[in-house]
Image (tube, rainbow, N blue to C red):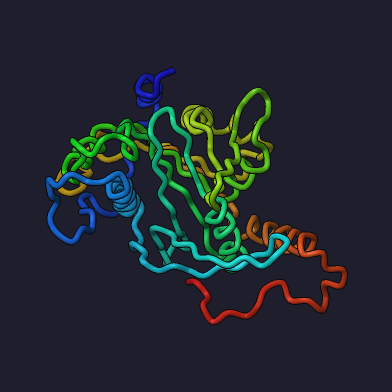
Amino acid sequence: MRLEKLVRDVLPSFTEEIIPVYRSVSVPVQISMSCRQLSPKERANFMGLFYECMTRALYGGKLNDLDYEVNWRNGERVSGTVRPDIINHKDGIAQDSKACCSGSECVISLKQFEGYRFLQSSNPDFQYLFPIYRHGLKGIKSAPTEGFTEKGIVLELARKTFHSVVLPLSVLIKMKEIPYVGGLNISRITETKNWRTSLNLKSSVINRFLFDPKGVLGIIGLNSEEFEIQRYRSPEELKICGVRIRPFPILRILNRDNSGWAEKFIFDYERELEREAGYRDTDDVPLFEESKDVPF
């Protein structure tokens, strides 16, 4: 089923228009949108900024420019950083926007995935969300440079953003644990010659969330009653860089009791670290070293 047809079929059931925090935002570039041809890396970065701004417009919060240091054990100590796109301290929500073209998987690096698990263990009062935007702008990372400018990308994404599925960390963790079930491909792990191994969420399952979220949650072993499922349509007058965004359906899944889930997650997470590190007497061994850099 083509993505455009799927969206046309489900859009009538998304009748409630989300009330955005901002109806008009701009991508933070150093100069006004230029017509300079962009390299593949510049195009991907600009598209990322576009969807970060869309997430902020829809849900509020502040664009984040801080990298938070994280540490975890996986047989050995590993260090790195993770940077949520948007942080809303008032509501205790941090979001990391993802974009994937129709027919393509949603890619999350495993270092980033593990970084968010560490942040959740350190910040149980926060809920970490991943807004995934499906779009139809092909070749953003590989096509020839010609035809890709900042203005051109905004105009294309404004009319080719097809839908958004927002998933909490709790669901991503389960999708990683169960890559295939009931005839449905959920996710896969890719390994390359360099360190960039990743968790790839299958295109078909992201689309299926849009029209059957309770069914997908059940398939991967989660109780849909533990989640709040929200259906919205993006606002008619939402603008980015002065360009009106064509309305698209939004399926948002939140933990109903995030504190309760976080408490259980932290317990399991700490036991997992203990097992992987091979500790026998865990009472005398700290799970994490004290750090002065405590995010949030």
Q: Position of residue 87 (x, y in %)?
A: 41, 62
Q: Residue at x 12, y 55 (%)?
A: 32
Q: Residue at x 52, y 50 (%)?
A: 196
Q: Residue at x 34, y 63 (%)?
A: 62
Q: Is residue 209 visible?
A: no
Q: Is residue 102 above or below residue 271?
A: above
Q: Quadrant of residue 160?
A: top left
Q: Nearer the viewer, residue 124 or 153?
A: 153
Q: Is residue 271 left or right of residue 147?
A: right
Q: Position of residue 143 (x, y in %)?
A: 29, 34
Q: Is residue 225 left or right of residue 11?
A: right
Q: Is residue 282 left or right of residue 239?
A: right
Q: Nearer the viewer, residue 48 or 74?
A: 74
Q: Is residue 257 above or below residue 252?
A: below
Q: Nearer the viewer, residue 284 or 227?
A: 284
Quarter holding the N terminus is top left
Q: Is residue 294 visible?
A: yes
Q: Residue furthest front?
A: 193
Q: Residue at x 47, y 63 (%)?
A: 92
Q: Position of residue 291 (x, y in %)?
A: 58, 79
Q: Is residue 229 left or right of residue 139?
A: right
Q: Position of residue 97 (x, y in %)?
A: 40, 49
Task: Count how many numbered circles sit on residues in the image.
Answer: 0
